[in-house]
Structures are given as structure tokens and as C-alpha cells.
Amino acid sequence: MDDENTGTIDQWFDSTFMVLNESYQLDLRRVLSPDTCELVYALSDYYMYDNIGLFIHLLGLSSHYLTSTSFVYADNQLKHKLNLHLLIVVRAGYERSSLVEHLKQAMNNVQSLRQTGQQYDIRHTFNPNVFCRSDESTISSGLCLSDRFDEHGTYTHIQKQNSFSIIGTSTEQYLRKLLEAKFNSNSNNNSSNNNVHNHINNTDWLIMFIASKARLFCRRSKLFDPNRYPSLEQWIIVLNCHCLNLMDFYFDEPQANQFMCDYLDTLSVKATSLEDSHPWMSARYLAAREHVLRVSASLRIIESTVETLIVYRRTFHTFGQVDKVFFDNCTHIIEQTRGTTATTRVNINVGIVQSAIYFVNASIKQFEIIFEPTLNGGTPNPETSSLINQGSISDRSWITHSSSSFLPRSTSSSSKRLKTFVDPSYNGHFSSIDYH
């Protein structure tokens, strides 16, 4: 491809990414319950992480823990796996490494507590099932966690992980290659270009573009109160404990099942209508059928872990240390909520279905704006996120919401049909999160 075309693609990518940053960023208040959203913001404030990036990593970690033990059933009959391939696309100003390293250490701490009863010693090597390497000899099992996805994203390397969960963070180069492959497919149809096309446009990827935010120490929460919030390590411990047993996820509420089935049908119709004119978008809509089912199950577990943490806080009045005592107490609380059957039947309620739909819709819309501009007929989200990290956690009140800074979700009547792509802003609120 000549320099003129390269410059055109670069200009398009830069200008379009700016539009995404200003108008199409994910709003976590429309994905998570107030309790969970508050906790994500509180941890992001303290650790100086991007709140959307933290949530997506927790979503991928949930799918990783669920993959070997659980399934989700579309229309309460058709079995689907739960592994997710999540790709975060950011600009050069986005800090990537600290969250990934923290997540790896927290996962190793869970394993250490479970096996030895002791906290993980950071001076020892990482769990080999968690990797972030650029070679192609890595163990082909476990979670693929990469903050250097542009360097690690060789086709053979990633292909080994197709049956497992992947969380990658890319800075521009990866998507620029995709733009080159798409917009120059007719004039540069060589084997190398085809390999790039097949690799990057693998429809397994659920892609989310995130704006860079200035993480300022003057806005950071200086103190973290263990009497009020759990640490990220403790959240991951509870997440792991919830996912240890066999679980089958169903949409037992008739409205939830109807909403999900309607959305899956909408995706099929959209995919069929675009397969000749916009094959890339057609493939994206078909992939979204799998994405929304898997995301709904991972969201369900994330909400369940927060419910457990709230019970822990009310029972013991403090979260204390990241130790065997905390681990055993959480295990006991979770066991009390489970049934006696070998496989637990878990209900995905209508609120979580709507949240998963909003999340997947946001990903599809971002992809469309970047790669299919002729289809771009949507309206931007008026609730744009700030480019400065949120205020300190001291102005929030976990457990009770009298002073919560997070907006409540709108409530819809039971007769109102899900608008899906006609109005992707439609969203309901969570109902009970108890096991069914």
C-alpha cells in the first residue's frame, strides 16, 4: 500500500477514534447495578485504574473461571460455552501494565490461599497458566492476559487459546492493520494480507474502544477503608469461590428469556440483511449472538460476588486482610446460598439481560463507526464520560444509596418490548440477585 493510502487510513482512524472518545464511550451505570458500579469506581479511584478497563478485565476473568465448569442455555435449552475473547483498543496515552500485573498477582494469591493457606509471595514466579508473552510456545491452557497485544497477537499464538478466555489490550497498530486489510482488500489481495484479515477479523473478538483518562494523584483517594470496601484481591477471591462449583445459567423469568430470544433474532435478521453489502458487519452481528449470552452469564457472577461481599460486610463489619480467614468466611457464605445438587441452576434476570444487550450494542456501534462508516446512522450517547478520573470514594456510601452518586436505571413496564437496535439506550434495573 502506498504512502498516500496509509496517510488516509491514519487520518480516518485518528479522527474516528476521537468521535468514539467523545460520544460513544461505555457507560458503566447502564451495565452494572449501583452497588457494583460504585465498587468499580471506588477501586479505580484508589488504584488509579480506568474504570471501564477494570470492569472488562473482571468480565474476562469471570468467563475464565466459568469456562471449565459452566454453560449458559439459550432459550433455556441450547447449551453455549462461556469463554470470552475481549479486546480493548486504546491510544498511546492509556496506561496498560499496572492493572494486568495486579490482576495476575491477585489470581496467584487466590491459588496460593487455596493450596497453602498463605498469601502469594510476589518474589516467586507467576502461575504458568497466566501468561503475557510474545513467543508461540506458551502453554495452551488457562487465561491469556496480554497488555501488549500488538506484539503478542501472532495468529498461531492466539489460535492456541481459542477454547479459553483472552483479554488483550491493543494500542492502534492492531486496528490499523484491520483497516488496511478491509479498505485495500481489492487492490492488495496477497496471502499476507489475507492472513491479517483472517486473524484480526476473527469474529470471536468482542472489541471495546476506551478513551485515555488522566489519572491524577491530586484526585486519587489516599486512604482505603477496609471497613467500607473490599480490595481488588478480595473481590477476585470471592469471584473464584463462586465459580468453583458446576453452574448452569438459565433465563427462568419469562420476560428475560423473551428479551434474550428477541435480541438473538434481531441479530440474525441484521446479519442476513447485510451479508452481501457489508459482510464484515454481518459477521459481527452473528458473533454478537454468542457474545451476549456469554456476557450475561459473566455479569450474573460479577453481581453475585458483590452480593456476597455485601453480606460479608454486614456480617463481619470489616473486610479485614487478604488471608485464609477471609477466604474461609467467603466460602462459608457462598455454601449457605447454594443448593444441594451437584450442578447449581443460576437464573439470569431481565436486568442482567438488558445490561448485556447494552454492552454488546455499544461494542457493535463502535465497530460500525470505525469500519463501516456508510452504516453509521446512530446518535451519540449524551452521557459522555469525563477524561479526568472520578472524585474520591469519600463522597459515596456503599451498601446504602442515600448519597450515591450513580444514577438509577429507568424502569420499564412488563408489556414494553425490548427495542434492541431501534433504541439501544433502553435499559431496565436489576431485580433480585439470589440463586434460583
Image (cartoon, rainbow, N blue to C red):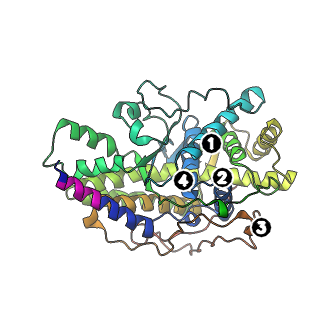
Q: CA distance from mark 1 to mark 2?
A: 10 Å
- Mark 2 vs mark 4, foreground winner is 2
Residue located beneath label 4 in the image: 53
Q: Is residue 418 left or right of residue 194?
A: right
Circle nearer the N terminus (1, 2) = 2
Q: CA distance from mark 4 to mark 1?
A: 13 Å
| Observer-nearest of 46 and 276 | 46
Residue located beneath label 1 in the image: 102
Secondary structure, mark 1, is: helix
Label 3 sits on what residue type? Thr
Query: Are the residues flagged by discs 4 and 1 in contact, CB closer than 8 Å?
Result: no
Circle nearer the N terminus (2, 3) = 2
Residue located beneath label 2 in the image: 47
Residue 400 tag number: 3
Circle nearer the N terminus (4, 3) = 4
Q: CA distance from mark 4 to mark 3?
A: 26 Å
Q: Quadrant of residue 130?
A: top right
Residue 436 shows up from this direction: no
Question: Range of the magenta residues?
Answer: 4-11
Query: Are the residues flagged by discs 4 and 3 in contact, CB closer than 8 Å?
Result: no
Circle nearer the N terminus (2, 4) = 2
Secondary structure, mark 4, is: helix
Does residue 302 lie above or below 100 as drawn? below
Label 1 sits on what residue type? His
Check disc 1: other Cα within 10 Å, few if <14, some if 14-19, many if 20+: some
Does residue 238 lie above or below 259 as drawn? above
- Mark 4 vs mark 3, foreground winner is 4
